[in-house]
Image (cartoon, rainbow, N blue to C red):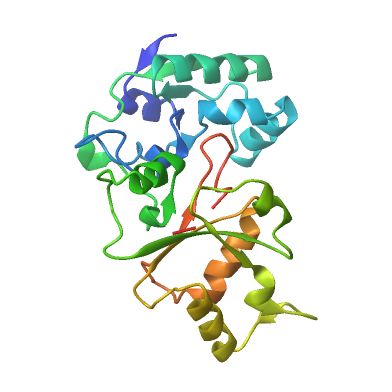
Amino acid sequence: MPALTLSHLQQQHGVAIDTRLSAYYNGWPQRANGPEGHEPQALNLSARWLGAMSDDQLRAWAKQHQLQSDTPIALYGSPEDNASVAARLKQTGFTRLSTLSDALSQTDRLQKLPHFEQLVYPQWLHDLQQGKAVAAAPAGDWKVFEAAWGAPKLYLLSHIPGAGYIDTNEVESEPLWNKVSDAQLKAMLAKHGIRHDTTVILYGRDVYAAARVVRSCCTPGSKTCACLTAAGRPGPTPGCR
């Protein structure tokens, strides 16, 4: 593929696409002291997502971002990831593909997702559990929970090592599924050993369950709740810190 600088791409009214893991796009460093974030106005189409996306879903993603078949597109990431994404885009009908030659070279222009630290990712959690140094490490005690509705059937079959289980019925109630009383929430948190300063890392096979627990239990601006994103799927899925 030909190569373009970001300025040349912008002159052509093109779009940069980050093919790395969404965690790195969001703002997590890919390596110690490495660049954090993504190029200005870049989209994220991780090569890891491709196996879970049909051609129709990829076309819908492109339409959502107003990409036409002749839109100039410059990819950046590893050569392998760029090649994988380029192949799928060509298959979907895109014709003006290149690589971004100066990607991640100017750290002052990189952008981050606001509060990206609250979307943690699997390797981060694994390293934390292994006692390794991680970026944005919890300041004190931390706990991992799987969130889902009803009895923990799938949780009992398999779950992240050391994770507890929170039933969404503990934080909301029928008929309108509104948040339960503060007294009930306080009792639930105490039952699970969660203090006001405990960092809670939540995940769910259905991400909405984890999100609903976060919404019910964490105050706006709280830094003690986060969502775990799955490396192999588009966007936030299994998990919240």
Going by the image, does 13 lie left or right of 230? left
State whether residue 56 is above or below residue 89: below
- Please identify the residue farthest to the top as the structure is shown: 1
Residue 36 percent across, percent down from the top left: 29, 40
Work out whether residue 165 or residue 103 is closer to the camera in this orientation and state it.
Answer: 165
State whether residue 166 is above or below residue 171: above
Residue at 31% across / 26% down in the picture? 103
Going by the image, does 132 lie left or right of 235? left
State whether residue 155 is above or below residue 60: below
Residue at 53% across / 42% down in the picture? 230
Residue 207 in which image quadrant:
bottom right
Whether residue 55 is visible to the viewer of this picture, yes or no, is yes
State whether residue 156 is above or below residue 3: below
Q: Quadrant of the N terminus?
A: top left
Work out whether residue 173 or residue 193 is closer to the camera in this orientation and state it.
Answer: 193
Q: Tell me how many marks there are.
A: 0
Residue at 74% across / 30% down in the picture? 56
Residue 222 in which image quadrant:
bottom left
Work out whether residue 177 or residue 197 is closer to the camera in this orientation and state it.
Answer: 197
Work out whether residue 186 or residue 33 is closer to the camera in this orientation and state it.
Answer: 186
Residue 35 percent across, percent down from the top left: 25, 36
